[in-house]
Amino acid sequence: MSDNYPNKKVIVERIKRIALITLSNGDMNLFDSEQVMLFRDALLELKKDPKVRVIVIRGSGNRAFSAGFDLKESGNVDVFLNTGQEFMGLLYNFPVPKIALVHGYAIGIGCLVTFACDFRYCTKDVVFSLPEIKYKFMFPTHGGMTITSKIVRKPSDAKFILCTGDKIKVPLAEKMGLIDQLFDTKEEMENAGMELARKLGSMDSTVMSSILTVFDKCASVGLAEGMSIENEALEVVQSRGKEKKDLLQKLKEKYLDESFF
C-alpha cells in the first residue's frame, strides 16, 4: 500500500513491513506548518497499522535532510511548538526501529528528528546543528535537552552541541556517536538503510517492541532493577494470544510516556 501523492510534503510508502517516510519540501526541506501537521498525522496513521515493523525517514532534497523550522512562519507558534512536540514524542516513543537516512544539513527540528531515531545512516556531507543558542528568545525545545544527552557518548558532547550551536561535521559527529554508518553517496546510504530495515522487519515483532519499550528505563537503572524489568518483558514475550497483546500494552503504559505511545 502506498500513500505516495506528488503534492504532499510528507510522502508515506508502505513496503511490506517497512514504512518509508520522505520529507519532500524543497532542497532544504524546511518544516513549515503544513509539513509539521502532515508528519504528525503520518505517525498517528502508522500507529494504527500493526503490519508496520520498521520506519525509515529520508529527505528528498539535494542539500538537506531538513534544515529545521521555516522561520518565516514563526507566527505559527501553536503548530510549531505543540504539534511539533507531539510528533517528536510520537516518533521517539514509537516502539519499532526507526532509521534516519541523513544527507546534507540536519538542523534544528530536522536534527532532532534524526536524534529521535534508533539508527542514523549518513553521507559524508552530513552536518548536524542545534543553533537555538545563537538566537534571542529561542531554546532547544522539542526534546533538544532531553534526547541529545541520550545519544551522545558523553555529557560534554551534548553540552557542546547545545551551548555552541556549532555545525557538527564528520569526523566530529562520528566521535560523538551521532553517526552509525557513513556512506559516499545518498544511493549507497539508502540501499544500506533499506537492507537494515528489511533485516529488522524480519525479527519477532513482540520481542522487538518489548526491547524498545523498556530500553531507556533499563539503561538508566541499576542491574537488579534492570533485570526485574527484563523479566517483565520476558513475561510478555512468552505469553500467547490476547494475553500477549494486553501485557504488551501494559508494558508500554508503564515504561513509555503515555501521552505519545
Image: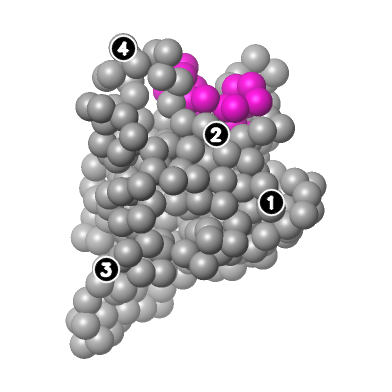
Q: Real-space Cα distance between discs 2 and 1?
A: 14 Å
Q: Which mark is residue 66?
A: 2
Amino acid type at circle 4 is: Gly
Which mark's residue is nearer the viewer, 3 or 4? 4
**What is the secondary structure assignment of the residue under circle 3?**
helix
Let me know if residue 20 is in the magenta part. no
Q: Position of residue 178 (x, y in %)?
A: 50, 59
Which of the two discs, 2 and 1, labels the residue nearer the N terminus? Answer: 2
Q: Which residues are magenta?
A: 21-39
Amino acid type at circle 3 is: Lys
Q: Residue at x 25, y 86 (%)?
A: 223
Q: Are marks 3 and 1 in contact (CB under 8 Å)?
A: no
| Disc 3 crowd, CA 10 A, few/some/many (<14, 14-19, 20+) | some
Q: Is residue 213 visible?
A: no
Amino acid type at circle 2 is: Ser
Q: Nearer the viewer, residue 234 or 134?
A: 134
Which of the two discs, 3 and 2, labels the residue nearer the N terminus? Answer: 2
User: Label 4: which residue?
Assistant: 75
**What is the secondary structure assignment of the residue under circle 2?**
strand
**What is the secondary structure assignment of the residue under circle 1?**
strand
Left/right of residue 86 with respect to residue 169 in the rendered view: left
Question: Where is 130 relative to 160, above or below?
Answer: above
Q: Real-space Cα distance between discs 4 and 2?
A: 20 Å
Q: Residue at x 21, y 82 (%)?
A: 222
Question: Where is 105 relative to 6, above or below?
Answer: below
Q: Are marks 3 and 4 in contact (CB under 8 Å)?
A: no
Which of the two discs, 1 and 4, labels the residue nearer the N terminus? Answer: 4
Q: Which mark is residue 217?
A: 3
Question: Where is 78 relative to 257, above or below?
Answer: above
Q: Which mark is residue 123?
A: 1
Quarter of the image where the N terminus is located: top right
